[in-house]
Image: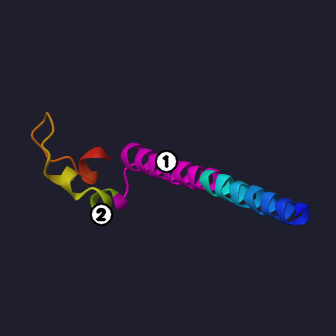
Amino acid sequence: MAKVYTISVLLYTLVQSACCFASYLSYIIAFHFALLFISDAISTFWKPGSRRDELYPVLSIIPTHSGQSLTTSTLC
């Protein structure tokens, strides 16, 4: 009986550890993708390039204070 109890406790601990690890792993992955998104947004807006109009096409129709559209050509 003690052997069955020991095995069940070990299995329970293993499953609990695996779930805890999976939870932490999902947070790490989500944080990684959030950092990627933030760095891509910063590089897109602060270093205008050819990808700006592909990623954010709505910006090409937003007028600026000078009356021009906010596109890559006006920001360079």
User: Which image quarter is the N terminus in?
Assistant: bottom right
Q: Which residues are magenta?
A: 24-51
- Magenta stretch contains residue 10: no
Residue 14 vs residue 62: left or right?
right
Identify the residue at horizontal 73%, vertical 58% (top origin): 12
**N-terminal label among 2 and 1:** 1
Amino acid type of the residue tagged 1 in the rendering: Ser
User: Which residue is at the far front?
Assistant: 1
**Category of crowding for the residue at label 1, using alpha-carbon neighbours closer than 10 angstroms: few (below 14), some (14–19), many (at least 20):** few
Dominant SS in magenta: helix
- For badge 2, the amino acid type reads Glu
Horizontal side of residue 1 vs 47, given as left or right: right
Residue 22, which numbered label?
none
Colouring of the image: rainbow
Checking the image for residue 54, the label placed there is: 2
Q: Which residue lies at the image location 37% right of the left edge and 50% below the top edge?
A: 48
Q: Residues within 10 Å of mark 2 (few under 14, many from 20)?
A: few
Alpha carbons under labels 2 and 1: distance apart: 17 Å
Residue contact between numbered discs 2 and 1, judged by CB atoms under 8 Å? no
Q: Nearer the viewer, mark 2 or mark 1?
A: 1
Residue shown at 51% from the left, 52% from the top: 36
Mark number, residue 39: 1
SS type, badge 2: helix
Residue 55 versus residue 41 in the image, above or below: below
Image coords of residue 57 (percent x, y)? 22, 58
Q: Is residue 46 magenta?
A: yes
In this rendering, position of residue 25 left or right of residue 37: right
